[in-house]
Amino acid sequence: MDIIQTIRERRSINFFEPGKTIPENTLRELLEIANLAPSSFNLQPWKVIVVRDPERKKALRVCAFNQPKVEEASAVLIMVADPRGLEENLDRMLDSWVELGYLKPEMRETYADMARNIQSTEDSLKRKVFAVKNTALFAMNLMLAAKGLGLETHPMDGFDEDCVKNEFGVPANKIIPMLVAVGYLKSGITLLPRAFRRNIDEFVRFEKY
Ligand SMILES: Cc1cc2nc3c(=O)[nH]c(=O)nc-3n(C[C@H](O)[C@H](O)[C@H](O)COP(=O)(O)O)c2cc1C
């Protein structure tokens, strides 16, 4: 599917075909394509928990204010933003830049310092924002990739973060910006037309706020 058509046709789907599984190779392909998302300094501060087991989806549904789509979708992906993405990935990211010729070896430490300074300390608000914004781009990439692979999605922030962390063993220092339900549209369902979008003149300014 052409990218413009994919964007135009992506919708947040409320009715998934229950009991339908996503083939393993499709799920892996989906995650691999999503993983091509851009990120600050290419630090990729995201982790994903794929929830497919019916009992685990039931537990997740309880954390997600009983939203039925959590149980009905083939899988629900818990997006985890990791403020420690910098520590975890900086070295191999710089290695790859040096190896591929993006960066001269003598500039490696200068870039490392720049990245550390920009992202601030591990518990800072800046670091949390860094982790969340990049994970949100990953999630958007995933939703578009899903559409291209014949799947439907629904992003959700209607959940109790502590409940999800407790149920799924997510460490306290991580952030869960959203869940993304993935699956197939329930047969016989016709979507309502897409709801209100602002006219671009309402929110676009040129050159100045
Ligand atoms: C970060 C985020 C969180 C959302 N959380 C929920 C949610 O918890 N439950 C829900 O029914 N819809 C949720 N939505 C879906 C929005 O309502 C939906 O994207 C919006 O109405 C536009 O519809 P569309 O995605 O079909 O264009 C969420 C969307 C985003 C981007």
Image (cartoon, rainbow, N blue to C red):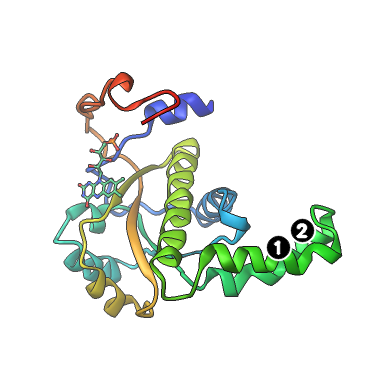
Whether pointer 2 and pointer 1 mark residues with C-beta atoms closer than 8 Å, the reply is: yes
Q: Where is residue 5 in the image (x, y as percent from the top left)?
A: 46, 24
Labels 2 and 1: the sequence-earlier one = 2
Judged left or right of residue 3, residue 209 is left
* Residue ID for mark 1: 111
Label 1 residue SS: helix
Q: Nearer the viewer, mark 2 or mark 1?
A: 1
Judged left or right of residue 98, residue 190 is left
Give above or below for 127 relative to 185. below
Judged left or right of residue 7, residue 87 is right
Give above or below for 47 relative to 74. below
Q: Which residue is pictured at 45% across the width and 66% down the height? A: 127
Residue 121: give its label. none
Label 2 residue SS: helix
* Dot 2 beta carbon under 8 Å from ligand 1: no
Q: Which residue is pictured at 30% across the width and 54% down the height? A: 19
Q: Quadrant of the C terminus?
A: top left
Q: Where is residue 196 in the image (x, y as percent from the top left)?
A: 21, 26
Give above or below for 186 relative to 110. above
Decide which of 48, 110 is in the foreground and name it: 110
Asked whether residue 1 appears in the rendered view, the answer is no
User: How would you rate the neighbour count of disc 2 (Cα within 10 Å): few for under 14, some for 14-19, many for 20 or more?
Assistant: some
Q: Which residue is pictured at 49% across the width and 36% down the height? A: 148
User: How would you rate the neighbour count of disc 1 (Cα within 10 Å): few for under 14, some for 14-19, many for 20 or more?
Assistant: some
* Residue ID for mark 2: 97
Asked whether residue 46 appears in the rendered view, the answer is yes
Decide which of 149, 160 is in the foreground and name it: 160
State the image quarter where residue 193 is shown.
Answer: top left
Q: Where is residue 6 in the image (x, y as percent from the top left)?
A: 45, 30
Decide which of 57, 63 is in the foreground and name it: 63
Distance (Cα) linking label 2 and label 1? 10 Å
Kind of residue at badge 2: Trp
